[in-house]
Image (spheres, grey):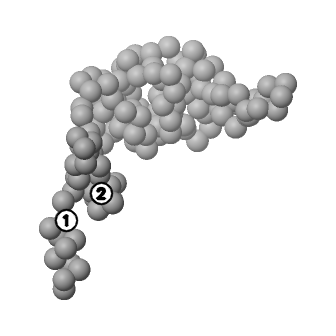
C-alpha cells in the first residue's frame, strides 16, 4: 500500500539544476497514450478506398484492392484496371466512378499486376524500391 501511494504521488517530471528529466512512469504513460490524428484537409488515405466495390453508372466494375500513385487498382474476376482517383464521384459503401479511359486503365492495370510481385536489386544486391 505504501509503494502504491508513492507511485501515485511521484512527480512526472523532475527538475535538477534547471534541467527537466522525465521519470520512467511518465515515459511509460506517454508510450501508451494515443496521439490524436490531425486531419489534413482534402488529403485522403488509401484505406478509405480499399476493399470496396467499384461501380460506373449501374455496371459493377470490380473490387478496389490497392491505391498507387493517385490511381485506384480495381480487380475483376478476369482483369485488373488502374482508374484515376480524380474520376471518383462518390466514396461511401461503394465507390462510384465517372467516365475514364478504359484502354489506358486496362494497360496500366496489367502493368501493375505484372510488377507487383517483382523485386529489383542493384549491382551490390541491395533491394531497390
Dot 1 alpha-carbon crowd within 10 angstroms: few under 14, some 14 to 19, many 20 or more = few
Residue 1, numbered label = none
- The answer to whether any part of residue 87 appears in the image is yes
Dot 2 alpha-carbon crowd within 10 angstroms: few under 14, some 14 to 19, many 20 or more = few
Please provide percent x and percent y for residue 57: 34, 27
Q: Which residue position holds label 1?
A: 10
Left/right placement of residue 24 relative to residue 102 reads left
Which residue occupies 22% across, 71% down?
7
What's the distance in space between the residues labelled 1 and 2, CA to CA? 9 Å
Location of residue 107 (image quadrant) = top right
Left/right placement of residue 111 relative to residue 69 reads right
Which residue occupies 45% across, 21% down?
70
Up/down of 50 relative to 7, above or below: above
- The answer to whether any part of residue 53 appears in the image is no
Please provide percent x and percent y for residue 127: 73, 32
Location of residue 58 (image quadrant) = top left
Up/down of 117 relative to 121, above or below: below
Left/right placement of residue 24 relative to residue 79 reads left
Location of residue 90 (image quadrant) = top left
Please provide percent x and percent y for residue 68: 51, 27
Residue 23, numbered label = 2
Which residue occupies 58% across, 41% down?
77
**In-front residue for pair 101/112:** 112
Under circle 2, the secondary element is loop
The residue at the far bottom in this view is: 1
Q: Quadrant of the N terminus?
A: bottom left
Please provide percent x and percent y for residue 26: 27, 57
Up/down of 7 relative to 60, above or below: below
Which residue occupies 16% across, 76% down?
5
Q: Earlier in the sequence, mark 1 or mark 2?
A: 1
The answer to the question of whether label 1 and label 2 lie on touching residues, with beta carbons closer than 8 A, is yes
Amino acid at each position: 500500500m505504501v509503494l502504491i501511494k508513492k507511485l501515485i504521488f511521484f512527480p512526472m517530471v523532475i527538475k535538477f539544476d534547471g534541467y527537466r528529466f522525465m521519470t520512467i512512469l511518465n515515459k511509460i504513460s506517454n508510450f501508451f497514450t494515443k496521439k490524436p490524428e490531425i486531419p489534413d484537409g482534402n488529403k485522403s488515405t488509401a484505406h478509405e478506398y480499399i476493399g470496396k466495390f467499384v461501380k460506373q453508372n449501374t455496371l459493377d466494375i470490380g473490387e478496389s484492392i490497392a491505391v498507387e500513385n493517385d490511381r485506384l487498382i480495381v480487380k475483376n474476376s478476369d482483369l485488373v484496371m488502374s482508374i484515376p482517383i480524380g474520376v471518383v464521384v462518390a466514396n461511401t459503401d461503394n465507390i462510384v466512378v465517372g467516365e475514364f479511359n478504359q484502354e489506358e486503365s486496362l494497360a496500366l492495370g496489367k502493368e501493375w499486376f505484372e510488377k507487383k510481385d517483382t523485386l529489383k536489386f542493384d549491382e551490390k544486391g541491395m533491394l531497390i524500391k
